[in-house]
Image (spheres, rainbow, N blue to C red):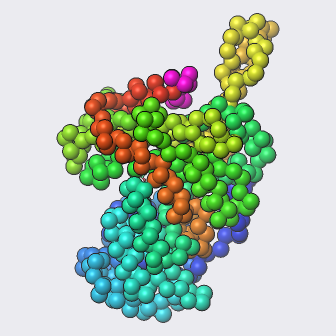
Amino acid sequence: MAEIAKPGNGRPERPGDPCLFVIFGATGDLTKRKLLPSLYNLAVHGLLPSHFAVVGAVRRDLDDATFRDDMGKALRDFATQPYDDDVWEGFRALLHVHSGDLGNVETYRGLAERLADLDRRHGTGGNVLFYLATPPEAFAEIVCHLGAAGLLRQEGERWRRVVIEKPFGRDIDSARALNTEVQQVLREDQVFRIDHYLGKETVQNLLVFRFANGIFEPVWNRRYIDHVQITVAEELGVEGRGAFYDRAGVLRDVIQNHAFALLSLVAMEPPSTLAGEAVRNEKVKVLEAIRPMQPEEILGASVRGQYGEGMVKGKKLPGYRAEPSVAPGSKTDTYAALRLQVDNWRWAGVPFYVRSGKRLARRDTRIVIQFKAPPLLLFRDAGLDTVEPNRLEIRIQPEESILVRMKAKVPGPAIRLQDVRLAFSYQDFGPLPQATGYERLLYDVMVGDATLYHRADMVEAAWKIATPILDLWESLPARDFPNYAAGSWGPAAADELLARDGRRWVNE
Ligand code: BG6
């Protein structure tokens, strides 16, 4: 079977370093749905450190036994691997809880003592990974308290690392402020800003696809590529997260982080190595090459939308404004499309169209590289005045595949052309391991590899692109919301955005 190379330095798989894994927000959804099942999957694959324990830092008064029972139930609900009593019994004994008000200094003094004790009991060598899975308002406060309690100090071989969930800020100023607070108590190599898109198998494969194959790189530029489309389409609505979403919107929630992360992997220059900083340097350079738009450019290069009610598979779905905890006159964007220009030698003049939305026709995350048409039309005699140019599609979810669309001659005496696909599907590797997508990311923190995490300058570069758009949208609230029906492909204006350039979105 072919082997899938992974980003990082190609080291052989070994269990993570011994450590205590402290989760802030341990009773929340993320812990139950993703973190716990991922740790369990790492245990099944023998990648969990030999000396390891989890400590849930929670506000509620909880004891270890109750926490373990709650987590056991969550695991039965959300495990992606078959639940195995033996693995769980071993894992259960590694779970602990520390209760206290996360805004209170005493909680952290107590936590320091608790960690010192658990470190002795579990032999974790003083290494601690703190995972901030709380609402974002708490990030700075927790990091400050951890610093003040001396919990972030590294000595000798002993490491202290902090994973920070999204959203990292809500515009350029707040992201910079958060970076400044974080950097007062942590070195950059201790900070892991997570983006779960970078844990997806096909996203990781992008680096391999581009840089382990020689045939695409020579044509990966403005001479051969007409434009690039990046789509992160969701079929789901806001799923009970109305209160959060109504203050965020799709530009903040998905485009500034996930979509821009995909764009940087597609457009970056080849790094000198596939290890940490080299990859991150190139990713930042691409985002920095996207010129932030002036207000007068923004309206012509962006489209925003909000879904109204719609019929999907014979079922009537409510509009966004009717979702629980959403303001009845909400102006929040649930759809956005942008035309971006990467101002560097490789990409000058090649538009990058990026779109994402909720309640669209289908779940579909896909990168389309549209090549230029052949320079000369040799098939006029066959009644063809235009030949659709080649297209490379990197499908990320739900289908995981890479395909090139080409023209081929239909067998027979006449010249008739037909679209055919050269396709590679992840299914070709056999049944795929059922994973949450967080396994690789968590493992990487345990071995200190930050390649798949966002560096401070990357987050700021992404906000520099998004903030002027958000500011303009806020100063000129949309008057036509809702402007697309649930279950459709978004507002008509998004089709016009491409039609004006003589192009169209690839939806099929
Ligand atoms: C999250 C957003 O970061 O990504 C959600 O907050 C969104 O609103 C989700 O639904 C999409 O992730 P995935 O992995 O389901 O494509």
Q: Is residue 157 left or right of residue 311?
A: right
**Marker count (numbered):** 0
Residue 131 shows in the view:
no
Residue 293, magenta (yes or no): no
In the image, the segment drawn in magenta is 499-507
Task: Locate residue 477, reporting x and y percent.
Answer: 29, 38
- Identity of the residue drawn at 69% across and 18% down: 387
- Identity of the residue drawn at 79% across and 46% down: 214
Task: Locate residue 351, reporting x and y percent.
Answer: 58, 35
**Location of residue 375 with respect to 125 vertically, above or below:** above
- Which one is nearer the viewer's eye here, 2 or 22? 22
- Which one is nearer the viewer's eye here, 360 or 223? 223
Residue 372 shows in the view:
yes
- Identity of the residue drawn at 56% across and 50% down: 287
Task: Locate residue 206, reporting x and y percent.
Answer: 64, 49
Q: Is residue 484 left or right of residue 83?
A: left
Name the quadrant containing residue 59: bottom left
Residue 505, magenta (yes or no): yes
Name the quadrant containing residue 157: bottom right
Magenta segment, principal secondary structure?
Answer: loop
**Location of residue 152 with respect to 483 vertically, above or below:** below
- Which one is nearer the viewer's eye here, 423 or 92? 423
Task: Locate residue 75, reporting x and y percent.
Answer: 40, 65
**Location of residue 409 with respect to 8 vertically, above or below:** above
- Identity of the residue drawn at 67% across and 52% down: 207
